[in-house]
Image (cartoon, coloured by chain):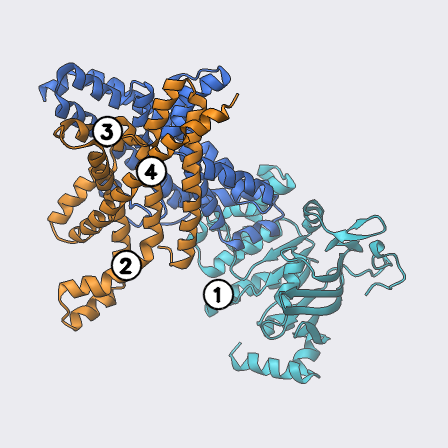
Chain colours: A cyan, B blue, C orange
Amino acid sequence: MPPSETPLHEGPQGVEGQPLIVFDQVVKRFGDLTVLDHLDFQVDPGERVTLIGPSGSGKTTILRLLMTLEKVTEGHIWVDGEPFSHMPRGSGLAPASESYLRAKRRRVGMVFQQFNLFPNMTVRQNITEAPIHVLGTPKDEANQRASDLLDLVGLGEKIDAHPTQLSGGQQQRVAIARALAMQPEILLLDEVTSALDPELVAGVLDVLREIAETTDITMLCVTHEMGFARDVSHRVLMFDQGQIAEEGHPDQIFGDPREERTKSFLRSVLDNGD
Amino acid sequence: MEFLIERLPLYLDGAWVTIQLTIGGSALAFVLAMVFGTLGSMKHWLPRAVATVYVEVFRGIAALVLMFWMAYALPVATGFQLEDRFAAIVALGLNVGAYGAEVVRAAINAVPKAQVEATVALNMSWFQRTRLVVLPQAWAQMLPTFGNLVIELMKATAVAYLIGVADLTAVAQQMRQGTGETIIAFVGALILYYLIAQVLISGMRLLERRANRRLGRTPSGGTGLSALLKYPAVGGGSAGVG
Amino acid sequence: MWDFEFTLEVMPDLLEGLWITVQATVMGYLIALALGLAIAMVRRVPYAGGVVHAVMEFIRTTPLLVQLVFVFLVAPSTVSGMTIGVVVLGVHYSAYTAEVYRSGIEGVAKGQWEAARALSLPARRTWGAIVLPQAIRKVIPALGNYLIAMFKDTPLLFAIGVAELLTQAQRLGAANFRVVEMYTLVGFLFLIVSIPSAILIRRLERRYAAV
């Protein structure tokens, strides 16, 4: 949380050890429903954070705010010390314009629960379209990178396939490659295995483990895969009713949860066979 | 029969004019439909209002009235005389374009929201999103109704005869006056109109199948010639053009 | 530029033309509604259905104007232009309404037919009490669209000498050398009728489930 005496538009101070993402008293309401209730939290550069909690507790909303798919109702979000949900105007902050958001969201990528591949494009086009048209990457380079990324996710031979010809798990791995092709500093993973048949989950999680081990991308991950969360994340946040109920190292959260809400949530998830 | 064969060249001349009107009118209608349909799908009120005015005005006025206005009122009002054929094409294009704009708007709005969210996650601009993702996907949905509109436009070209264009209908009238053979003269024209419509229907089916293949969908009507020859269904929302 | 005095002067004649336009539309529409339904039902009969379908397809893909002029020329001279206009409009549009009814009938769940069969209902009750009430309700907005479309096609009656709106406008415009006023007024009169009816149809669409 930024100290209140600093001018608003300068944000949290201190480059050394400065957090990458800061949520400052963020409120998100949909009509009468409050999804996030004066939420504060920070994520450090390179940190991998897993968000868990019952559905409707606001986890996905956090990712959607960071992807600028939603706007905050109150409060501010900062990325790398600069306002993200707002833009500087005069000495204060104003709601961010579309062009400001475009400049800011360049550092963020997202993988969706339902993959959201473009059905009018091949696998290759899905991956190269944004680098070519948004980043201005030369076509050859974008193609080369697409095939490298497809090799990484184990789908090198599917480069000219059509999304509808792939299984759900394969589509999701293409979606991961597509997000990585934009070279994001922050990768948002929104229940990326929830829409998959059980036998396809492992393949996707293996790819994500590999990415976690070999890169320093900051990851925010909403998932019900507790084993995966335990393996890859530095920190786990337990959400309930729009607030953080408990946070800590995965070993502590999963091995020795302190809050009753966390205990009952973990029990319910384990009962469902996850 | 002999009567018709003898006069086939004249009929073909008329049919060629009808085809020109159809192609010209469709091209104009297509451009107008794309522009105003896209404007109508935007979030801001101003482009939406512009699209609504265009659609309601040019859909609301009959093509024939529009054509009369272009041919007879415009020269008096502005001193600028349009060539008859051109006036007909502009009137047909404006009228059918208004119907088409509604089709385009509906098809754009039917592209799943998740697809738009994916373009945001890839940081595409509005223009990139529309060009690369939204329109290509909406295209497959527009085509069947576009097919119906092209047929409607082709049929509406007959009214150009009333402002003096020498189209297929004009040939039939000329033939009747010259020979007194009303039935043969008109049935000949109707058959040619029917054949033109069948060619247009087949062409649109080909386009539809290509568009669906692009989206990785298999055509529902089977494959091969038989599917090509099947009539497209008249959608509930595609009112006749008049 | 614009002659308002003249506008007021010709208004009664124009409105008379509009009234004829509306009459032709309504009568033609009633034919289209009834005939279209009959065609949609006959289309389910083997062979006869195929023949009817082919004929309607021919009518649907050829110009209304040519059909009007053709029938006008071959009909006995005792039949008025208005009668011919109304009948041809009605038959032409029944090709469209038949397709609308058909989609509605096909939209009725198969189980409804089977339930009627299981109750040994006669065909008349099956259609009249079970299938059509469900089918027609769903297609009311689509049918309404064709009413508007038909209204916009009535100027074609000009070609067979019916004194509808466009005919009146042409006569008055030519007689007074005021074509700009006349044709612009016709355009406005069309908008005055068609825009409110378009809004009405949208209401209908919201009220009844669209097909």
Q: What is the crowding at mark 4: few (fewer than 14 residues within 10 Å), some, or many (at least 20)?
A: some
Q: What is the crowding at mark 3: few (fewer than 14 residues within 10 Å), some, or many (at least 20)?
A: many
Q: What is the crowding at mark 1: few (fewer than 14 residues within 10 Å), some, or many (at least 20)?
A: some
Which labelled disc corresponds to residue C66? 3
What residue appears at the point 17 percent right and 54 percent down from the top-left corner? C44
Disc 3 to disc 1, C-alpha distance: 59 Å
Q: Are marks 2 and 1 in contact (CB under 8 Å)?
A: no
**Quadrant occupied by the C terminus of chain B:** top left
Q: Amino acid at mark 3?
A: Val
Disc 2 to disc 1, C-alpha distance: 39 Å
Disc with the residue nearer the chain's start (2 vs 4): 4
- Front residue of B132 and C52: C52
- Front residue of C18 and A226: C18
What percent of the width, then of the height, locates residue C153? 32, 35
SS assignment at label 3? helix
Which marked residue is nearer to the observer: mark 2 or mark 4? Answer: 4
Q: Are marks 3 and 4 in contact (CB under 8 Å)?
A: no
Disc 2 to disc 4, C-alpha distance: 32 Å
**Quadrant occupied by the N terminus of chain B:** top left
Q: What chain does badge 1 belong to?
A: A
Q: Which residue is mark 4?
A: C19
What residue appears at the point 59 percent right and 69 percent down from the top-left corner? A223
Whether callout 3 and callout 1 share a subunit is answered: no
Q: Amino acid at mark 4?
A: Trp
Which labelled disc corresponds to residue A196? 1
What residue appears at the point 18 percent right and 29 percent down from the top-left corner? C72
Q: Taking B25 as reference, is C130 left or right?
A: left
Which marked residue is nearer to the observer: mark 1 or mark 4? Answer: 4
Q: What chain does badge 4 belong to?
A: C
What percent of the width, then of the height, locates residue B162? 31, 22
Q: Which residue is mark 2?
A: C135
